[in-house]
Image (cartoon, rainbow, N blue to C red):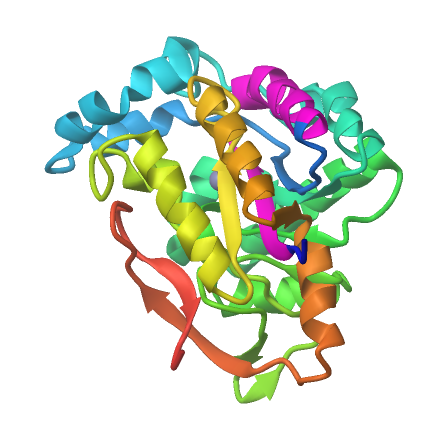
Amino acid sequence: MASHLLGLRVDVDTHDGMKNGVPVLLDLFREAGVEGTFYLSMGPDNAGKAVVNVLRRPGFLGKMRRTGAARVYGWRTVLSGTLLPARMIAAALPDVARRVTADGHEAGVHAWDHRRWQDKLPRLSDAEVADQLDRARQAFVDIFGEAPRTFAAPAWFGDERSLLLEEGFGLAYASDCRGVEPFLPVVKGVALATPQVPATLPTLDEALGDTHADARAFFDSVLDAAASTSWPVLTVHAEIEGGPYADDLRRFLRQAAERGIRPAPLGELLAASRATGAPLPERTMGYGTVPGRHGTVFMPLGT
Ligand SMILES: [Zn+2]
């Protein structure tokens, strides 16, 4: 059967997600015979600060109840960086990180301090943006003994500064935004050399309680979308699909195989896109919203 590629991206946002969720996903992917790209948060787990922020947000408690956020994240994470000290994420669990590449997956950099970037990027000084990326990159080198080939900005939230800094790292590609297909970002009128491979599909945490009744309905819609679009990329979270929704992901991977959809690292998706011979489109970047997600995300304009 001819296979249809689905970019499979795993985001690791918390200490517990790295420690417990990543091993669950590695076992699940091995069982399904699939490979993906894991984006690792390296530094402090300040996930608890999110709880303080979102408590002020209208509709938060309803969403918290519908998605079972305390069940997904656990109280240690919900309090991490607030009442309890922040624990390091991949930097504290290098053996788990190295299992990712030992199992044949692609590993990349997600963040130094995920929460700080996500909440504060527009207000961070140029020096701090550079510092966040440099620290994360160095932590990756310390773990893997080589430079990362790919970055993914936390929460699909980047800006021109982060794009230009990533360009200086000589990455093979980045996945900093939402979009519909691989492309070259244009900054100040010039196309960068570092392609973006955007996440194209919604995430389970966005869908639950907003657009879909349950995880099964969500994954069914992902199968349809993956089969009918050219460069689909699905993002799963170590804390969510590697946690209470692991069985739903297992079922999804089985059904994907039955439908001839083959999950693959994002680098493989980009290579397949390039192999068509068509040049990557060039896009100016901006911001937009996606259903179920608070705030704006980075995305190409004019698609
Ligand atoms: Zn993340």
| Residue 72 percent location from the top left of the image | 38, 19
Lateral position of residue 146 relative to residue 302, left or right: right
| Residue 298 percent location from the top left of the image | 42, 62
> In this picture, is 73 found above or below 42?
above
Lateral position of residue 112 relative to residue 49, left or right: right
Lateral position of residue 228 relative to residue 52, left or right: right
> In this picture, is 170 found above or below 33?
below
Foreground of the two, 211 or 134: 211
Range shown magenta: 4-31
| Residue 191 percent location from the top left of the image | 61, 83
Foreground of the two, 26 or 130: 26
- Please name the residue shown 69% across and 62% down the image: 173
- Please name the residue shown 50% across and 80% down the image: 283
Q: Main secondary structure of the magenta part?
A: helix
Give residue 48's quadrant in the image: top left
- Please name the residue shown 49% across and 34% down the image: 252
What is the number of callouts on the image?
0
Residue sitting at the far bottom: 189
Can residue 157 be seen in this snapshot? no
| Residue 239 percent location from the top left of the image | 48, 24
Foreground of the two, 172 or 200: 200
The quadrant of the image that shows the C terminus is: bottom left
Give residue 93's quadrant in the image: top right
Residue sitting at the far right: 145
Residue sitting at the far left: 58
- Please name the residue shown 80% across and 30% down the image: 103
Answer whether residue 143 is magenta in the image. no
Can residue 114 be seen in this snapshot? yes
